[in-house]
Image (cartoon, coloured by chain):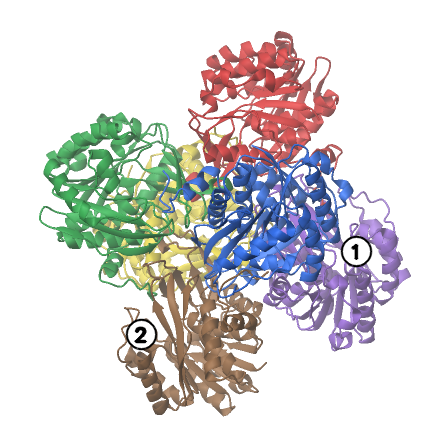
Chain colours: A green, B blue, C brown, D purple, E red, F yellow
Amino acid sequence: MSKVVTMGEIMLRLSTPGYERFVQAESFDAIYGGGEANVAVSLANYGHESYFVTKLPKHEIGQSAVNELRRYGVNTDYIVRGGERVGIYFSETGASMRPSKVIYDRSNSSIAEADVEEFDFDKIFKDAKWFHISGITPAISKKGAELTKAAMISAKKNGVTVSIDLNYRKKLWTPEEAQAVMKDLMQYVDVCIGNEEDASLCLGFTPKGLDVTSGKLDVSGYEQIFKEMKEEFGFKVVASTLRESYSASDNGWSACIYDGKEFYHSRKYDVRITDRVGGGDSFASGLITGLLEGKSSKDALEFAVAASALKHTVKGDFNLMSKEEVQTLVDGDASGRVQR
Amino acid sequence: MSKVVTMGEIMLRLSTPGYERFVQAESFDAIYGGGEANVAVSLANYGHESYFVTKLPKHEIGQSAVNELRRYGVNTDYIVRGGERVGIYFSETGASMRPSKVIYDRSNSSIAEADVEEFDFDKIFKDAKWFHISGITPAISKKGAELTKAAMISAKKNGVTVSIDLNYRKKLWTPEEAQAVMKDLMQYVDVCIGNEEDASLCLGFTPKGLDVTSGKLDVSGYEQIFKEMKEEFGFKVVASTLRESYSASDNGWSACIYDGKEFYHSRKYDVRITDRVGGGDSFASGLITGLLEGKSSKDALEFAVAASALKHTVKGDFNLMSKEEVQTLVDGDASGRVQR
Amino acid sequence: MSKVVTMGEIMLRLSTPGYERFVQAESFDAIYGGGEANVAVSLANYGHESYFVTKLPKHEIGQSAVNELRRYGVNTDYIVRGGERVGIYFSETGASMRPSKVIYDRSNSSIAEADVEEFDFDKIFKDAKWFHISGITPAISKKGAELTKAAMISAKKNGVTVSIDLNYRKKLWTPEEAQAVMKDLMQYVDVCIGNEEDASLCLGFTPKGLDVTSGKLDVSGYEQIFKEMKEEFGFKVVASTLRESYSASDNGWSACIYDGKEFYHSRKYDVRITDRVGGGDSFASGLITGLLEGKSSKDALEFAVAASALKHTVKGDFNLMSKEEVQTLVDGDASGRVQR
Amino acid sequence: MSKVVTMGEIMLRLSTPGYERFVQAESFDAIYGGGEANVAVSLANYGHESYFVTKLPKHEIGQSAVNELRRYGVNTDYIVRGGERVGIYFSETGASMRPSKVIYDRSNSSIAEADVEEFDFDKIFKDAKWFHISGITPAISKKGAELTKAAMISAKKNGVTVSIDLNYRKKLWTPEEAQAVMKDLMQYVDVCIGNEEDASLCLGFTPKGLDVTSGKLDVSGYEQIFKEMKEEFGFKVVASTLRESYSASDNGWSACIYDGKEFYHSRKYDVRITDRVGGGDSFASGLITGLLEGKSSKDALEFAVAASALKHTVKGDFNLMSKEEVQTLVDGDASGRVQR
Amino acid sequence: MSKVVTMGEIMLRLSTPGYERFVQAESFDAIYGGGEANVAVSLANYGHESYFVTKLPKHEIGQSAVNELRRYGVNTDYIVRGGERVGIYFSETGASMRPSKVIYDRSNSSIAEADVEEFDFDKIFKDAKWFHISGITPAISKKGAELTKAAMISAKKNGVTVSIDLNYRKKLWTPEEAQAVMKDLMQYVDVCIGNEEDASLCLGFTPKGLDVTSGKLDVSGYEQIFKEMKEEFGFKVVASTLRESYSASDNGWSACIYDGKEFYHSRKYDVRITDRVGGGDSFASGLITGLLEGKSSKDALEFAVAASALKHTVKGDFNLMSKEEVQTLVDGDASGRVQR
Amino acid sequence: MSKVVTMGEIMLRLSTPGYERFVQAESFDAIYGGGEANVAVSLANYGHESYFVTKLPKHEIGQSAVNELRRYGVNTDYIVRGGERVGIYFSETGASMRPSKVIYDRSNSSIAEADVEEFDFDKIFKDAKWFHISGITPAISKKGAELTKAAMISAKKNGVTVSIDLNYRKKLWTPEEAQAVMKDLMQYVDVCIGNEEDASLCLGFTPKGLDVTSGKLDVSGYEQIFKEMKEEFGFKVVASTLRESYSASDNGWSACIYDGKEFYHSRKYDVRITDRVGGGDSFASGLITGLLEGKSSKDALEFAVAASALKHTVKGDFNLMSKEEVQTLVDGDASGRVQR
């Protein structure tokens, strides 16, 4: 049980019920989540002392975000309260050949307008073992980028392992803007997680021979990229999930990792999707847990990919699976038999 | 953006929630829809000036049907108000090998008892480009048949292209009764849509080598039938969807068309079904849109079949897809990746 | 239409909505069911005069269990009222590789603490044709075991055919405890239903060459076991379902039977699962109905396996399918086409 | 515990959720009920052997009506199955000064088209103690009127006490039509229940000094009317509820009775309304129960009015109160304290 | 049936279900509404040709707002599409002494950032009879204020009667800011609606002897204020609702009007509240309808106050009452008796 | 902000939706609560460092109870995990003259079977300022009584103020059993909360001149009782709520207190009830907060009674009101005006 820290935005996701389209919705399910918050919940779930750092308004919508984190065991003591709004996004769940759809309304959220001075990073990272952040946080605003850098510097100063999930979002910035910020941050990163698109857009790498839309992925391309990334940025570990989108309902799901010695491609799961939001985050938290516990890269990867395969069956952003449940799948029981 | 007219019955569909059976239902989802109404909504959705013609009672259930049409952009100015009731049907959604089930309670609806004199067809068809109707409307009552004929005559007189979806319903009439009415109407029809059963039952044609229940369809049989149909009835275009019912949950879905020159069989989609009601109607509206916009038969067909494949993923009768969303699928992205 | 009797526990199943995990649930669907109660409802549904015997508290939760049985046509005249509680279990529905999960809270239920003297078995079995019970009832308590034995003795005395579904539950007793009770009961049993695990744990038999978790089943193993079982216990008929758990969402489903003359393996169905609870019970009631109506073992088995395949598509414990609906599937229409 | 028989129509009530207006409803609560069916359920609830006689279609909507009756203990053995439809009505619940609203769609229901020959009334009334019907059943159709008369004749022949709730419905017939049928039926009636309007419209009596809309009722007027009614028609007992409509949310509720000796006005309750449908029916069943058990007119009336006051707090048509719960209110505890 | 125009913001109201507090909500009801939009719907409902003018984003949340207006008959042809977001507010419904609560998140909405040039006011007001706006629209932004003024000028130029509902919102501006804008606009106003607070804060008037919190209002104070307001600003009519907040559940509701000749105080209703949002707007639309139809000030006021009393019983912002329903209440039937 | 400790049982309350009766319920709302847990949540809400002590099973239902406490800010570090079950109770909400009803199923819960040795009370009470418990905890089992005594002794040893809410539950023990346990515990109690019944049943006191059922309470009786109680047991403060049950929908609500110097009767609120469960607990937490903050007895009482009046408007057991919201009501604004 280690102290782990994540920082980022937790948003209010307004999700249409079932498979309803936006124009049909008479109500929205209210789900709180966000890249790093999802990682924080999953880490708490695995038994870590998990702290989430953000800024949220004082009103009840901000409080509800805090409450949802507390409910699942995340420590919210470092959350700053103030500012104007909780970032919002609307989502509808796709099915078959109809893709899921997202409408963002996240500008001017409290965390996007937060100042570095509002956070006591040295206190936050004291005795911490791991710091995780995604490429979304530096993308939301200039202040978000400053915050990310300040946190990373403090983390490294405090001897904390730093991981990042690149997570390029084209609605937040252009590749040029992303690279201007992200490349500089890489010097503080130990573990880099990124799928084929993210690596290309955030860091200027181009995976070869990959046709993403067609659902076909060439794993060997990853090995090459990962080696080059490690060389240039000094990462200790590079990993990525590999999603094969057969349809909005069914995906192939695996991952690969390179730790400087070995490149490894995990077992592949065919997942029937309940909710794919947070799939990548559950991979990150699984990987962090595996590495924190001293698992080999291969074992950590298998834990991470099983965890995130399971996430796709859980409604909401959070991966509400226990370590034992994930391990059962790693150990080979994917039969889905009733646990009585 | 053309003025298009559809005429028929809009019913109140009382649908059990989720996959509940009728005897389990403590509530019904209230969905308004019907063959031609579904076409009208989809046409409005694609940007046409879409008019739906029917008769509905003055009470609030009738008003709710009007409201649902208006909500999705259909012009309801030509709807006559009066009569006793809105036709009702109960539906439960099947799954796997359990078929969906429908119980009709549609007798004596306002439109089934409407007189030709209540509608000013010359006004209705003035400046219109297209008139679409299904074989259900003439089947609901003798007055429905009279109404259909009167509308078709006026449409032709006003230079409007006429399409029909044969849509045989065995609970409404016998093949003999159907043929007595339908054969006569064919003289006014430019575009005829019918699957293998409908062509046989409404017009006396027998598709060869087709075993419908087994889920296997012989496409070459269609080419022959379509040519014969065109010859005998003088249709300009004949088209049909081809459903392969693997189960109540998964269907194969394609379509074919014959325009006097070429016979074309579309790409086939494997659809995981959310709600298959209105699947055929979404094909009709897609085809009409394609032809109205001057697309080739082949391109119109691909648009129509992609539109209707997507419809199967949308709850309710209406195909709430935009032209852009359909086109994206036509252009080849069936991966269902999240649109962020 | 025969008088048939079932006896056992009917529980309150508190089921999380949709695919929600326990820790997400803000409400529970309230479903009443239990092995023998599920059989009773299905038998009533097929037109039999179906009596369910149990003990339930006098309060409204007990009354609700009675009401749910009455609603579906089960005669509740022999139900004794009294005791403290209705047994409860919590369930969450799995998806893909995430298994369904059950938490029991059934100790000290009214039926588990009922005395033999509270039931007038000679009256209960008068004019009855069939008595069915599962291996759960003797497992719930010492009194449950006494009750089971007393009922079986009375049933045989009254010339009633007796069937048992072995249904081993590891949370209720150890294999040793089970065998101590169950072996003795077999002398009264005419028809024994048990899957590979149950036969092994309740009666000490070991199926050979079966790897349950892997989803692969060797049918020939069953033939051998069934013959040995018949020999040792004098069963007239031995049958079992064969579940292949591809995942929590999709299963292969078939069954086999041995009647002393022939061993028969049914058609196999691939089922997309809505709710798999009660799957085995719907097999039992299908088999009983087939045998009661004088069908051949093979035909009875095909009816039973079709019935239970359909059950997997119905929410709740009860198999709310009519005889006609089952027969349609037996007759080969698994296309799931809409029944209009 | 006596055999009691009721006959009439059980309808599907499609009720908007909460206080939604018709045009807002995206779903309807499905409630089965009807004047005499409501009485039947309440009588079963009080421990009587309660039979409900009607005709319902064979399809699942008809079956659902049967099931709902069985669920609450009503014997459905005398229900004939066949015909086309279950009568429907839509309802929205009023609040404050907004009245509740009802839209009927009940023409051509199975019971409205049933023939006298379909019912074996001598079997139905064998050993029965009471027969209750309302003035709605003869109003739904000519066949309904014939059925009512045939049932009453058979009931009297079999020595069964007959009660009627006059229940004039202006959408079903005119006062002239009502009186033509109803006056003739009165010769078979022992106990007549009718409020001020019904007595006037069905039987041609005019209550004096009553201003219904204003919410003020002159009780002394009832004494006079009741005496005259008894004299002319030979009723043994005449009773009526007295509703004071303060608003759609709050009503005053009392009743009066005349048994040839004494006129009695009950205690008055101020009720906050959850669902007022079935309020009158719960009065009838309370009165019948009181009289069947040999209570004095006064005590029977107090039981009936307490029962029906409680009904106003229960959602749906049925009065799901036990005899003990009603008696507690009769005995004076209207404090609404929690029963732990 | 006159052409009437309203202009303002339509927001997405995210409302907790029932009486849930914000921190309890797992979902939000999605309701579209806003001061002038509510007036527009009600005017359409009364049969007017009602146009609503605003700007909404092109995405599906914007489209849903358009659809909801169309559903209830509002003409949306003048709505401009573009900009970033639909204004949002969260609401929870109070009960008893717990007040309803609102959290605004409306900054930077499309209409708040719209330019005057985007609207063709001369086309909009052509043939129009009435223009209504509230004091919220000029308050949302500087551009909102410019838009309001431009619209008013064009309305007057086109001979359109102009009404305003002052509606001071302290979260949008200070009294100083409000007065700087609002006083200037009054020159274009014919009919001014404002309660005691609004008159004071927007226009610098102070009602005498009014203690708002205590729930006691001195009507005579209004007469004085109205006369002074008319004199200074040249209004033709001044009116206001008078709310007495007994609690969050029950309010007294009346209104008063001054037309230069007579001051009139309406009948007072005691309303049990279902949803009080939009209460003032339903008063405005009632008053406009009354005046447009040539009713006397007194009759128009009684219509308006009855309409808005009824609104309090309807969920959502819109007053979904027909003219006939309102008139029935005006005519004196507040008994809430079922309309069958 | 003080460390406060509460100890007791947190149960799963299965509550029928809306005003449904048990026999109507198709689902139950899942609410976690219990006397002391409710106090703990409210204290956390007021800003205290609130610890709740109990024992809960390791399974997910136990975890859900933990999560719900964490969600609202309660520290769960002292909760022991183990044992068999979470206590359950079923509840239906009354209306008008129909009382709310509760069915308990709480035997053998984890906390009822917990041993004193499982809790490190000296650690628990270190630095704590207040310990609160109710009379329910010693009533649930012999072990519960031992636990209560051990906790009280440790609390006193650590200088912690001890309060008890007597809360007699007749389904848990007889007055004789209660008095045998409770009288002994009183030596450790500083602040005693009890209504008229509890004082009588737990401690053998008889309030004079109180007719509870009639809804009339004689306040002067309390002054006498409180003085005698203080004298005999050495309480520092005695307080009680005074509920006047007009009906299940409306109650009068006030309280009185005696601190050895003055007897004070608070302001009385008339509350329209949303959910009255936890009303008494919200009084206790309000009183504790007032006294902890050094308020006078009178001011603490007014805060407590306002807090608990507000609780009646909140669904669920917990009083989700902030200190500011309570204070606003204390300061006199009960108008329920919208807070915008």
Please, what secondary structure does the residue beneath circle 1 have? loop
Distance from the alpha carbon under mark 2 to that under mark 1? 70 Å
**Same chain shared by disc 2 and disc 1:** no
Q: x, y percentage for residue A89?
A: 39, 36
Residue at x-position 80% and y-position 63%: D143
Mark 2 and mark 1 in contact? Answer it, CB < 8 Å: no
Between label 2 and label 1, give the one nearer the viewer: 2
Q: Amino acid at mark 2?
A: Leu
Q: Nearer the viewer, residue D88 or F302?
A: D88
Residue F291 seen in the figure = no
* Residue E71 in which image quadrant: top right
Work out whether E66 lies above or below B22: above
Work out whether A25 lies above or below E186: below
Left or right of C170, for residue E285: right
Q: Nearer the viewer, residue D229 or E59?
A: E59
Work out whether D253 lies above or below F260: below
Q: Chain of mark 2?
A: C
Q: Which residue is mark 2?
A: C217
Q: x, y percentage for residue F38?
A: 39, 48
The quadrant of the image that shows the N terminus of chain C is bottom right
Please, what secondary structure does the residue beneath circle 2 have? loop
Q: Nearer the viewer, residue A231 or B131?
A: B131
Q: x, y percentage for residue B82?
A: 74, 43
Q: Amino acid at mark 1?
A: Gly
Which residue is situated farthest in the top direction here? E232
Q: x, y percentage for residue C340?
A: 59, 60
